[in-house]
Image (cartoon, rainbow, N blue to C red):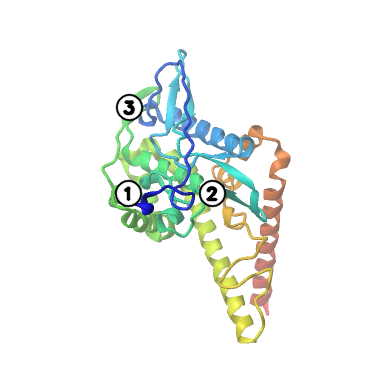
Amino acid sequence: MDSLKLTKDNHQGRVFRGLAIASPCYKKLWQAGSIENFKKVWLDCLHFHYLVFTKGKVLHRDISEHNLMVLEHPDGTVTGILSDWDTANFVDTEAQDGVCVRVTAGHHHRTGTPPFMALDLLHGRDRVHHPRHDLESFFYILIWAVFHYKFLHPTNGISKAALALPHEKLVAAWLGPPDQIYTAKVKLVMSVEGHDVFQALKMDSRSEAWADVVRTWIEPLHICIRDARSGAGDDRRMASNVVLAQRRQGKKDDVEGAGKGKLGTGYDDATYGGRLTYFRFMRAIGMTKTLETWDDPINFKEDKAILRAEKKEKLRKLLETDASDTD
């Protein structure tokens, strides 16, 4: 019977949070009424997610279509409400490793709604939930909506139905077990197949109403997330190669780099080395200025500095290539 005894080692603490609200009933995301309303709600929820994390030091950890709610006002406008905070957790700022933010110790169990969970959480690579995981979930909601939501879309003053597409095989697989969801998402996010799906969405007459969302939001975010994951993978492989080279030379592991492929205390794995942040996410959809209205622009000084450094490095490589071609 001792094995059934609750201890700190076998029982993870949970915080019960309750809130009584006297307000009209909120609608589900798929009841937003129009694509423009959907975009407004999605962006409002992202805004609130940003503020709660940066100001309140709380991470939601379960972004899904069920938790992005619609509050409809008497004048017909809508506001997005980010709900369902029962798996949210405070950020442990005292446990930071360099610039890597960790969630309070004891909450390492996988959280989220499987169809919308980030790849690294589904795979099990990440045992700590980071903001980039929630940003990835916001991206999956966009793809899910294109295939499933029916809205009235105004065209030339006439409202017409934006027909939801049938379950495309890669998206339908999101309803399966975690391994199946992971495989389907990898194909969609990291391979050429994903690009083909997005191209098909723009060409399909049934998704005409969603074409602008695909072109201006989904495709740029796809590139942002894909490149961030690829870059982080390159970083890990490079770190592993450095460690192996040091060992072959009989050198001890660099204390700053560490053994077994670790990336060093200065590396921010929480953002894939600075590649997937709120700034990068909003920049991908052309809303950097909007993000700066959410907070003091100076808070994005580091993001902008990284972008300038990347541009200089790309220019340097381009000049080197041109020089070698002329030799």
Task: Give the residue number, with chain letter if any, for mark 3.
Answer: 160
Query: Considering only order in the chain, which callout, 2 or 1, is on the residue closer to the N terminus?
Result: 2
190 is higher (above) or lower (below) than 218: below
User: Dot 1, how many residues are within 10 Å of its Cα: few (below 14), some (14-19), or many (20+)?
Assistant: many
Image spot of residue 59 (x, y percent): 54, 41
Q: Earlier in the sequence, mark 3 or mark 1?
A: 3
Label 3: element kind: strand
Vertical placement of residue 286 versus 233, above or below: above
Whole-percent x, y for residue 253 in the image? 65, 76
Instruction: Please tell me whether mark 1 sits on a helix, a strand or a loop.
Output: helix
Q: Which residue extends farthest top?
A: 74
Q: Nearer the viewer, residue 322 or 288?
A: 288
Marks 3/2: CA distance?
A: 40 Å
Instruction: Look at 35% across and 58% down and name the residue there.
Output: 183
From the viewer's perspective, is 97 left or right of 16? right
Distance CA(mark 1)–CA(mark 2) = 21 Å
Q: Is residue 82 left or right of residue 252?
A: left
The amino acid type of the residue labelled 1 equals Trp
Q: What residue sits right under mark 1 in the picture?
A: 174
Which amino acid is tagged 3? Lys
> Foreground mark, 1 or 2?
2
